[in-house]
Structure formats: C-alpha cells, structure tokens
Amino acid sequence: MMKYRFLFLLLGIIARAFGQDSDLPNDFLKDTFHKQRREKLREKLPANSVAVFFANPVRNRANDVDFIYHQDPDLFYLTGYREPHAVLLVFKDMQPASNGNYNEIIFVQPRNVRAEMWNGRRLGDNGVRTQLGISPAFNNRDFARYGIDFSKFDKILFFDFKNDVRDVASDSSDLSDLIRQFKIKIKYPDSRNLVLQKEPPPTNLDTQGLESIMDQLRGIKTQEEISLIRKAVKISCQAQIEVMKAIRPGMSEREIEGIHQYVFKKYQAEDMGYPSIVGAGHNGCILHYIDNYKPQITNKELILMDLGAEFHGYTADITRTIPVNGKFSEEQKLVYELVLKAQEAAMKICKPGTSFTSIYQATKEIIDKGLIELGIAKPGERHNYYPHGCCHHIGLDVHDRGPYEVLEENMAITIEPGIYIPENSPCDPKWWGIAVRIEDDFLVTRGGFEHLSVLGPRTVKDIEETMKLPSPLDAFVLPDLDKTEKKD
Ligand code: GLY
Ligand code: MN
Ligand code: MN
C-alpha cells in the first residue's frame, strides 16, 4: 500500500512538472504572500469580528459572450483566487469546530468537467486548499447550510452590495445566491422590505470599516508586489518607446493602441490595467478618451497616450505626449516644458511625510504661473486647463486603494500634471488642440523616491531622439485589404 501511495505521489509531482501546471507562468504571487496578507488583515480587524469578501460578478457582454473575468482586487490580494462565485471569511479569532478550529474559510465554485471543457479549468475546493493554501475550503453550495452564528460577532465587516449581480437560474450557488444567503444569515436590512421587517436591524453590521483597513494594507506595497509593479511599468515604458519609433503621420489612433498592446502581450502582460487612451490633437483634451477612433493622425498633431500593462494583476499607469511627425512645434514645446517643469517640482518633494495635497499644489502653482506667462490664462481668472488631480496609488487597481494623506515608504504612486486647451478656449487659437499630460510611476523610498518609469523618454530632447530611431514595424507592411483577392 505504501509503495502505491509513493507511486501516486511521484506521478503527481511529474504531472505537475510537465502537465497542466507547466502551462502556467511560475512567477505569480505565492500562497505564502496571500496568507501573510490575511494575517496582516486579521491583526487590523477589531475585536470579535469577521471580514467578508465576495468575488467579482461575471458581466455579460452580449448573449453568449461574457466580458473577460477580472477578480475583485481585495479578494485576489487575500487569496490569489481568480475565479468567480466565491466568498472568503477572515475571522479575528479562532472559531471552534468539531474537526479542528479555523480562523478563515472560503467557499468556491466546484469542479465541473463539462463547464471546464467549455470555459476553462477550475481549482475547486481541493485546488484552493492545495495550491492556494486556504483551509478550510468548501464548495460554494455548502455555504447556505454552513453553521456560522453571525449574531455572536461584535462586528461583521463587508462592502455593501450594489445590486448589480445577475442570478444564473441554472446555478443555485452562484454569486447572487451567496450574497442572498449571506444577507439571510446576517439579517441584513433590505431597504425595500424595511417596513415588513419585524425585528430591528442588527447593530453589528459594518459596511464602512473595511475600506480604511484595506486602504492601509494595500497602500503599502510588499517586495513581491513591487517587483510585479516594476515589471508592468517596464513593459509599458517599452510599449511607449516602440510607438515613438514606429509612429508616422497617417497612422490611426487604433493602430497606435495596437502597437502598445502587442508589446504588452509580447512580454506576457495578461491585460491592460484600464483601456488605453490614445488621443491625437483635440482628442487629447478628453481626459478619458478611449474611443481611439481617429483613422488618420495628421502631420502637426500631438498624440497623448495614457496606458498601463497589467502583469499578474498589477498595473502601470504611464502617459507620454509626443509630436506625430517627430518634432514639437514652438507652441507644443512651450506647453510641454511647462508640464514637465510642474512634474519636476512635484518630484522634488516626493518623499515620506509629504502630503498628497502639497504634491498637487506644487504642480498647480507652476502651471498657473506658466499659463499666465505664456498668455494662455489671464491673471486673477480661474481657468480649466488643468482640471484633474496629480497623484494616485497604483497596484492591483490603476487608481489603487491606499490612504491619501501623506506619502509613506513603499507606496507606489503616479505624478501626472497636464494642460489641455480645447478648441474655442479663451486664448489665441494657436494654442487650441494642444493637450499634454506627462505621467510617471514612482516608488516612495525612505530617502525620497525611485523613478520606476525612468525608461520612458520624457524630455523634449529624449522624445525627439527616440522618434528618429528605426522601428521593426517599418518592415511590417500589411496588404491593402481592398486589393487582396483569393487566387484559385
Ligand atoms: N489612466 C488614468 C489616470 O491616469 O489616472
Ligand atoms: Mn494616473
Ligand atoms: Mn494614466
């Protein structure tokens, strides 16, 4: 018997080395990372409490096609689990059970041969135990009958529900059912039924407290996270460099977007952290322009490109603004250098202890003064040429969780001043259509910062020099589709 057990063990190891698992990258965050994050969460939880996290819903795109699934970043951070229809409970204290005490528990979608044949592999409860190291783990259909007396906790912490989750009729333990069952268990006061409810609502429900706990945790990056952010940033810088080399007047915004994305995928980035913003000329003035529809970028335009590769869950956020023809015009250069000066001023004070507000103020003062000097804005008048903030955390979300008070060591942030002058602005029309944002990613260090996106050319000189370099895409010429015909 021992001999067979050994044989199975050996076969298991060989299968893991050469079989299914070898199809996966081996540099994902480890189970030890997620376990440590759950421990840190537990330390921050109030006495006699439980924190509850649900998976993100599956979103339908149209008919039989769903949007690509993206896990809820808090649940991913705490578990590494990337599938839908799950709920995680992290308890402050050990919970007694006849088969062993536990201080966390997860319910996940079950293995299913047919579903996996159509839609991909599932870990199931067993995989969650063995590969993610979370125990106990159960199938989600066990959640309804699992006996947890929620009334005994002083606090049940969870993020309030948004009522935008579909109930899959053929599945009685999908996310919608898990939420419904949870609401019953905790006696959640449903605002629509409040008048019908006989008992007063429980006093131990807390939909506010988890936010600041998760902000504190996720706002300070661990070394494992920093190395993934570094990778995402490096990939994104390279994507910007390749576009600088390849761009020619006459290309479309969509093609530029495609070059970025090819570079992302070439380096194994799974996704974009957000839809790429590729806006030529006036389109650059639309802050979150993601249509990227312009079929031909014209010779004298600037193009604003705001993008971030997402690598193993972590995203970069980098903006470069470049002249399509490789040379900034006089007006473009003046505005560009003003934005750069604002960014440099912010970088000078980027260190632990500086407030997020003062970083913004540093950029705003420079931009306000510079716009008046250039005659774009009038002294004493409010303008709308710099309509956004300048700094946010990056991580699992592009606008990541984190405290927004003062900078602390190992925060990963952006600094992103910008000036946008849309058509019909109250200034000389020679400025119209100039939109410049310069956005870089930084790690706050003990003595100041590490400029993570330093590889992305940023000065006028560096951009113009990079744009002179040959591109491998010069040789990648596709046929005109109107002229391609199938020959028999
Ligand atoms: N890409 C969105 C932002 O820069 O905040
Ligand atoms: Mn940003
Ligand atoms: Mn951005």
Image: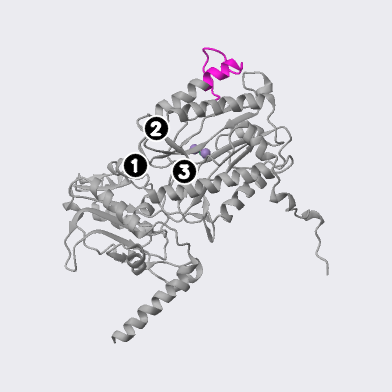
The stretch of residues the image draws in magenta is 367-385
Residue placed under numbered mark 1 in the picture: 215
- Which is the main secondary structure of the residues drawn in magenta? loop
**SS at badge 2:** loop
Residue placed under numbered mark 3 in the picture: 398
* Beta carbon at label 3 within 8 Å of ligand 1: yes
Relative to 27, say whether 395 is above or below. above
First-in-chain label (3 vs 2): 2
Q: Amino acid at mark 2?
A: Lys
Local crowd size for mark 2, using a 10 Å CA cut-off: few (<14), some (14–19), many (≥20): many
Q: Is 14 included in the stretch rendered in magenta? A: no
Residue depicted at x 47% and y 73% = 18
Give the numbered dot on residue 351: 2
Horizontal arrangement in the rendering, residue 243 relative to residue 145 (left or right): right
Q: CA distance from mark 1 to mark 3?
A: 14 Å
Q: Quadrant of residue 13?
A: bottom left
Residue occupying the far front of the picture: 447
Residue 36 image offset from top left, x and y in percent: 30, 54
Residue depicted at x 55% and y 46% = 236
Q: Nearer the viewer, residue 401 or 86?
A: 401
